[in-house]
Image (cartoon, rainbow, N blue to C red):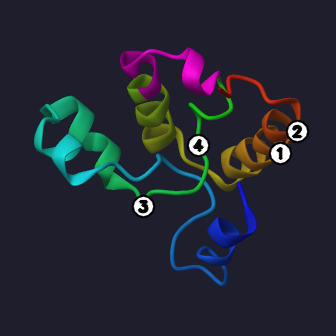
């Protein structure tokens, strides 16, 4: 997460956490289950970013995003933000 990205979420045009925004051509290929990712606003960081990022398969990333959609809470957002800072500083899953 860098400063220009942070500035787009303050004071709140988009959430800090949530599934990453998909590309339009990606959403055209989504099946009904994967479309549930679109039920929440995209954010700067999410479940897959704190769970391995580039080390995860597409199916694993989608599963984590859907878990976020189904289990959203302020506490979950706080955990994601905390773990994001830790992952960024440690470089976990980054290439």
Magenta stretch, residue numbers: 52-61
**Label disc, if present, on residue 85 of the rendered structure:** 1
What is the secondary structure assignment of the residue under circle 4?
Answer: loop
Which residue position is annotated with label 2? 89
| Labelled pair 4, 1 in contact (Cβ < 8 Å) | no
**Gap between marks 1 and 2, in whole Å?**
6 Å
Density class for disc 3 (Cα within 10 Å; few <14, some 14-19, many ≥20) is: some
- Examine the residues drawn in magenta and state their main secondary structure: helix
Report the disc number at residue 41.
3
Mark earlier in primary sequence (2, 3): 3
Q: Would you place residue 38 above or below residue 61 in this image? A: below
Residue at image position (62%, 35%) is 49
Q: Determine contact: label 1, label 2, CB under 8 Å.
A: yes
In the displayed structure, 45 sits above or below 91; it is: below
Q: Secondary structure at mark 3?
A: loop
Q: Secondary structure at mark 2?
A: helix
Q: CA distance from mark 4 to mark 3?
A: 11 Å
How many angstroms separate mark 4 from mark 1 (CA)? 12 Å
């Amino acid at each position: 997460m860098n400063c220009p990205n942070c500035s787009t979420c303050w004071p709140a045009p988009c959430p800090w956490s949530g599934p990453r925004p998909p590309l339009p051509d990606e959403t055209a290929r989504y099946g009904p289950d994967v479309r549930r990712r679109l039920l929440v606003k995209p954010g700067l960081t999410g479940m897959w970013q704190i769970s391995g990022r580039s080390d995860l398969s597409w199916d694993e990333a989608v599963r984590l995003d859907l878990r976020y959609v189904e289990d959203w809470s302020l506490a979950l957002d706080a955990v994601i933000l905390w773990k994001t800072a830790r992952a960024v500083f440690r470089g976990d899953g980054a290439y």
